[in-house]
Image (tube, helix red, strand yellow):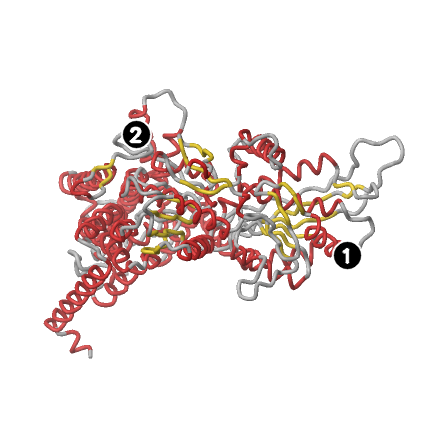
Amino acid sequence: MQGFLGNRSVKRGLTVAAVVILVAFILLLARQNNYGPKAFAQWTIDGIRGGSIYGLVGLGFVVIFSVTGVINFAQGEFVMLGAMFCATFYALDVPLPPPLKLVVAIILTVIIVTLVGVIMERATIAPARARGAHIVTLIIITIGFTIAVRATALLIWGSRAKIVPAFTNLQQTDVIFRPFGLTLSAQSLWIWGTVALVLAALYYFFERTMMGKAFRACAINPRAAELMGINPGRMSLLSFSLAAAVGAVGGIVFGAATRPQYDMGLVFGLKGFVAAIMAGMVNPLGAVLGGLILGVAENVGTGVTGLYGYKDLIAIVILILILLFRPQGIIGGGERGVEQT
Amino acid sequence: MKKLAFATVTMIVLLGLLVSACGAPAPTEPTPAPADTPTTAPEATPIPEPVIGMTYKIGFAPSVTGGGSFLGEPERNVAEIILEALEEAGGVVGPDGVIHPVEIIMGDTESNPDVAASLARRYIDEDEVVALVMGSLTPISMAISAVAMEAEVPYVSMASSSVIVKSPDTGEVYYWVFKSPQGNFEVGQWQVERLNAMEDVTSVCYLYENTGYGGDCYNNSSGQLTEAGYENVFEGAFERTDTEFPQVPAIEAAGCDVVVIGAIPPGASNAHAAVRAALPDIPIIHGHGVCVQDFIDVGGEPIEGAELPCSAVIIAEDVPADDPQKEVFTDFKTAYEEYTGQPVSTFGGHAWDALSWVLEALESLDDGMTLDEQRVAVRDYIETNITNWPGTAGVFNINTEDHCGIDYTSFTWFKVEDQGFVPFPAEEW
């Protein structure tokens, strides 16, 4: 059996067959329910919106994992904190014109959530690692951190949803474009632009700055990097800060598209993790792409089958399939990756 | 120093895990401490000296945390308001002039049926309560109902479904169980009338939240609307925390004339906004889970034009003076808004009605009854004496066949206009 499935062309054949069956199934359902290309286009657009945030969260996973080997399950909470803090700061009664108020709120939020990331690393991860804790212990610590953050959020903000204004008109209700009869909110454009900006900024950081290069060195080979004089502890701190900042940015820009609640982080953490797995936990761009693919798959999958309660199932199935058949990831993963853990 | 820091942080993390593990799936808030029983009588009357009887205890527990906290928080606020008033008065006065202090024991069902059932057990066995007022959500109330029936303790639920008080299969009324909110069946009746008055409406799309309440909304709305001749072309559930709504393109493809949503905020607001963004003109109708200002505030401008049945307590000032509910509306709204600083909540009103019934029943008890006699007497009182009883949810007429006592005329039909609720009477349809 192992030999049969291990055969490359058999694997390829099976994959193609599976894809063909899936597409046929989707088309059949679409025909049955009258879903035209417009519905699919709408699902795809909406899926890319949520998928962008999955991608940013996945990016955070990859950033931390590649340097420290820790899978930070608290990643989703950074998104939640970003959205909630931004809503809180924007709602403060200060005599500033709304656009300026929003900018200040965003800056403050990113700073605070980055600080949360720093605290998380310094107070929980670093001391544990210093005492020789196993990687799995560190991962469990991040899970504990998630629970603590969520409970604290409930205490601080209560269970009601908050409001972050749409960036375009600074109202609660966004501007909506209707290209070809589809519904495209202006905030979606902001989200996509933000993702592109984050990717560009990270590219510049990793390629063009000394700190970024040191970071990449640490990601490729921590032992050698240490021998070269790069401080792994500082890199670990940097990775957590970066991941927190990226998560916060995602939370802010997405919070304006929906109504943030204290427990919205759990779902993003899970889906972002799947996105990161799709990239083998090592490729940042792959994680963003994985997130987009996951978002679209989810939306189209539940839309076309009508099984809305099973949305998370799609993410879990993808996760299991990848871990079973291709743990090094399907998008630009390396030979390193989750197998290391 | 590092050792100490690590030890401290580890302890905190462990404690955090422990606390949340001991609680329900959702993180728990510390439960409020039970109220103190007043030990002094109110202003001394010259002759004779007021006699203080035994303390009556009521077991009270809404869903303060968890998915039902949107309903549970206002209900707990109301219990605190009533408790304050009771403490000021020293308790309830029996028919023989004996003053009985009343203790409302505060708890939290955490929106979890198991927690609720064991809490009810504890109230009954350890705290020896006379009556239970618990359960903001239907599945929670079902769990408590089983406990109350078995222990023979009167129980007033603050959740809406009729299956709480009456078996859906046999139609048998549960002897010890009552409820104070209007049901989704009554909501459905109003929705049928509204659709009948609309032109060119033949098909309906249903969107509801994936909870007991949402499912009950869907069953009642679709059941009655389909019976009235409206075709059900689409039905889909969504989660409270959903941010994307793939149901919307499916609704567009189904081509229905009206969308009926059964949910509470913020899910209801998000779903409504998503549908409104894709279909700017389609009528969207809700149930009575969104009769709170928060529904409009969270949703914003897209919520304009939503139609829904509500208790008129939300516009208490505009209710005509000869309306039998005017007084209770005004008392409740004023007390609630003064205490919380927030707009009135119809969910809080359910707690107001429920606790008022129990307190009235307690007032009728003679001194010196045993606990079992008290429980039977309270149950009998609620079943026989809550007649033509104006409450926040309606004018109640409880009898042996009907342990809720209000029909769909207790609702007023509203429309959302200018970011507020405006009555939309049948003459204007």
Q: Nearer the viewer, residue B372 or A156?
A: B372
Amino acid marked by disc 2: Leu
Rendered image quadrant of residue B79: top right
**Mark 1 and mark 2: Cα distance apart in space:** 62 Å
Please identify the quadrant where the N terminus of chain B is shown. top left
| Chain of the residue under label 2 | A
Q: Nearer the viewer, mark 1 or mark 2?
A: 1
* Picture residue at 54% right of the left edge, 44% below the top: B409
Q: Does the rendering let one see residue A95?
A: yes
Q: Nearer the viewer, residue B128 or A35?
A: A35
Q: Which residue is mark 1?
A: B373
Q: Which residue is mark 2?
A: A170
Horizontal arrangement in the rendering, residue A222 relative to residue B76 (left or right): left
Q: Residue furthest top?
A: A95
**Depicted A304 relative to depicted A182: above or below:** below
Amino acid marked by disc 1: Glu
Q: Does the rendering let one see residue A149?
A: no
